[in-house]
Image (cartoon, helix red, strand yellow):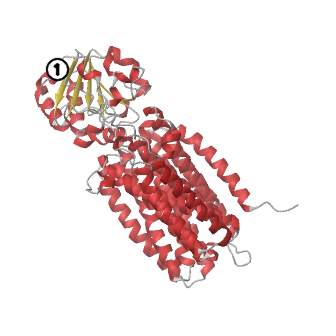
């Protein structure tokens, strides 16, 4: 097998990866797309095994290492993919980002230790300067991706006591200055490595990158996680592309760039949906201004009702729009909600779901939960497609969402002014389920809760909806 | 004529791939953004190719340990990423029987 054939197989695999992403343009074509992705990966792996056999002869002792790693890692991956709950998807995705980041770092270390083994042609016994630069970039992006994702994972799971894993942002004086200084120091070590190919600057640079990854993510609060998760998605792609550059492997560059641009686009969409600037997100430290408005909410009267009242209201309407939010995911109420919707549909009531782009903790989080509960995706609408219909809707049922339906986003001067919202306040009746009157993530009071047509139902989303289902019988 | 540096060729591939990625990803339906993230997790695990070379071709202990570890980590994503995407996409499948009246 000549090197040309190897590269041609890699090209084939790259095309498969593009097909995998292309398939996701519609649920019907997506499964075929995923199959393309698997085929592409299989082609890449088998080709590489053939290449190793050719290069190392028939001894094959090296392949034992490869298969050993594959069995351990693959087994763990399969186990997690089978067992993970759909409400825990953000954690799984963050975990996987960290795997890519760390893997990229390990490969870079191996490449610096034994460049020829990875196919890097030496010039005068040293790694060519271009490859040195690329190794440096691949390593620090990988390291930042790893430690950043670990922090993001902790924040998303919310089950660790350690302060840096808490959802609340960690902000301290001179944060940006420290980050900037560390970044400069890291680049300086990179330049040092670039000229000398010495281990010391390489290791210092790597250590700083790990610390930077932590520092970039800790000031970001829990509800901003959709941006963070997509940003780290992007980083993991760039890390792969960086490794591709260092190893002169076009397939790695193509796959890495696809992932990198995908993550970047998702971050952009998330930022747009929160009305934040892309730049401030990339720099990290956003969400730091929150907490200013917290506590501003004074006790105002709201109309609260019981599950029976809700059931009555829903049962006597013609059209219902359900607005799910993070509260639904926390309560794992998706199946119960579906049950309630079935009951309403059986009564001849039109039921639809309205999804805000940043509802939940990652892009598309709510869609997956509803799909898990076997909600037909044709009942599920994106914000822009359903916003104009709220005016003709009898009842909007807001489940565990807050800021995404806050009409304050239309008031100039408000902290969330300009953020696109679901116009629930235009409906004839509004029902809001929340655990308490606590303000949402943005720390803002929500006018929607005080409107005459709004009824609040307090309690755990799952419990409340279960009661409604009973009352509907 | 002098040869074009391989880094330049890589750069060309890089820019064109970003261009392709940009256009393909904008066409992804928002409902499938979570599967998009998990499938891109699997795809970026393509670094496994570099990891395999590091695991099999290196001779020093450092190189081999790094290589095997990298293969293991990347394999988590290759297998886990594609399988969890498959599991999610199955959920988006249209159900054959649309409405079943009886409560469960």
Q: Residue at x 26, y 34 (%)?
A: A400
A274 sits left or right of A86 in the view: right
Q: Residue at x 43, y 59 (%)?
A: A147
Q: Nearer the viewer, residue A72 or A25?
A: A72
Q: Residue furthest bottom?
A: A59
A194 sits left or right of A156 in the view: right
Is residue A379 visible in the rendered structure shown here? no
Q: Is residue A167 above or below residue A75?
A: above
Is residue A207 visible in the rendered structure shown here? yes
Q: Nearer the viewer, residue A24 or A362?
A: A362
Give the image location of residue A353, x and y in percent. 32, 29
A287 sits left or right of A197 in the view: left
Q: Is the residue marked by circle 1 packed among few (<14), some (14-19), or many (20+) residues within 10 Å?
A: few
Give the image location of residue A18, x and y in percent. 57, 49
Query: Dividing the image into 4 quarters, which one contains the N terminus of chain A?
Result: bottom right
Give the image location of residue A324, x and y in percent. 30, 33
Instruction: Name the quadrant containing residue A422.
Output: top left
Query: Dividing the image into 4 quarters, which one contains the C terminus of chain A?
Result: top left
Instruction: Name the quadrant containing residue A347.
Output: top left
Residue that mark 1 sits on: A303
Q: Is residue A142 above or below residue B97?
A: below
Chain bearing tag 1 is A
Q: Nearer the viewer, residue B33 or A150?
A: A150
Give the image location of residue B58, x and y in percent. 56, 79
Q: Residue at x 11, y 27 (%)?
A: A471
């Amino acid at each position: 097998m000549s090197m040309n054939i190897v590269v041609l197989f890699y090209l084939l695999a790259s095309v498969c990866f593009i097909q995998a992403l292309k398939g996701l343009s519609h649920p019907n074509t997506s499964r075929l797309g995923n199959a393309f992705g698997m085929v592409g990966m299989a082609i890449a792996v088998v080709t590489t095994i053939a290449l190793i056999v050719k290069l190392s002869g028939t001894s094959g002792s090296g392949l034992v290492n490869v298969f050993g790693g594959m069995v351990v890692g693959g087994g763990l991956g399969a186990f997690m993919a089978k067992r993970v709950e759909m409400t825990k998807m953000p954690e799984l995705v963050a975990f996987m980002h960290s795997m890519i980041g760390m893997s990229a770092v390990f490969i870079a270390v191996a490449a610096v230790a034994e460049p020829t083994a990875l196919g890097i042609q030496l010039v005068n016994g040293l790694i060519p300067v271009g490859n040195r630069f690329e190794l440096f970039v691949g390593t620090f992006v990988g390291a930042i991706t790893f430690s950043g994702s670990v922090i993001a994972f902790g924040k998303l799971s919310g089950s660790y006591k350690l302060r840096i894993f808490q959802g609340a942002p960690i902000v301290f004086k001179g944060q940006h200055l420290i980050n900037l200084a560390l970044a400069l120091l890291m680049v300086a070590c990179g330049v040092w490595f670039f000229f000398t190919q010495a281990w010391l600057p390489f290791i210092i640079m790597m250590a700083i990158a790990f610390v930077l990854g932590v520092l970039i993510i800790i000031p970001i609060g829990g509800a901003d996680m959709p941006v963070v998760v997509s940003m780290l998605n992007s980083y993991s792609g760039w890390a792969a592309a960086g490794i591709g550059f260092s190893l002169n492997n076009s397939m790695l560059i193509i796959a890495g760039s696809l992932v990198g641009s995908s993550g970047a686009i998702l971050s952009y969409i998330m930022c747009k949906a929160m009305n934040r600037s892309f730049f401030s997100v990339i720099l990290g430290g956003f969400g730091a201004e929150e907490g200013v408005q917290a506590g501003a909410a004074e006790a105002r009267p709201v109309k609260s009702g019981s599950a029976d009242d809700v059931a009555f209201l829903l049962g006597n309407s013609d059209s219902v729009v359900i607005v799910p939010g993070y509260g639904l995911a926390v309560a794992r109420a998706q199946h119960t909600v579906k049950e309630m919707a079935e009951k309403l549909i059986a009564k001849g009531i039109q039921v639809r779901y309205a999804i805000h782009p940043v509802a939940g903790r990652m892009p598309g989080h709510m869609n997956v939960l509803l799909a898990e509960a076997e909600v037909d995706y044709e009942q599920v609408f994106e914000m822009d497609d359903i916003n104009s219909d709220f005016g003709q809707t009898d009842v909007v049922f807001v489940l565990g969402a807050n800021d995404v339906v806050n009409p304050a986003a239309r008031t100039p001067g408000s902290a969330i002014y300009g953020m696109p919202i679901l116009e629930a306040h235009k409906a004839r009746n509004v029902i809001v389920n929340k655990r308490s009157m606590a303000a949402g993530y943005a720390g803002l009071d929500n006018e929607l809760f005080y409107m005459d047509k709004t009824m609040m139902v307090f309690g755990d989303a799952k419990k409340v909806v279960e009661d409604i289902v009973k009352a509907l019988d | 004529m002098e040869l074009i540096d391989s880094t330049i060729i890589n750069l060309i591939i890089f820019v064109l791939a970003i261009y392709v990625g940009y256009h393909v990803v904008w066409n992804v339906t928002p409902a499938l953004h979570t599967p998009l993230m998990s499938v891109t997790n699997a795809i970026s695990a393509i670094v496994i190719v570099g990891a395999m070379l590091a695991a099999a071709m290196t001779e020093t202990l450092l190189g081999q340990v790094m290589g095997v570890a990298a293969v293991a980590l990347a394999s988590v994503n290759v297998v886990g990423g594609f399988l969890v995407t498959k599991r999610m996409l199955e959920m988006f499948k249209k159900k054959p029987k649309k409405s079943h009246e009886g409560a469960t």
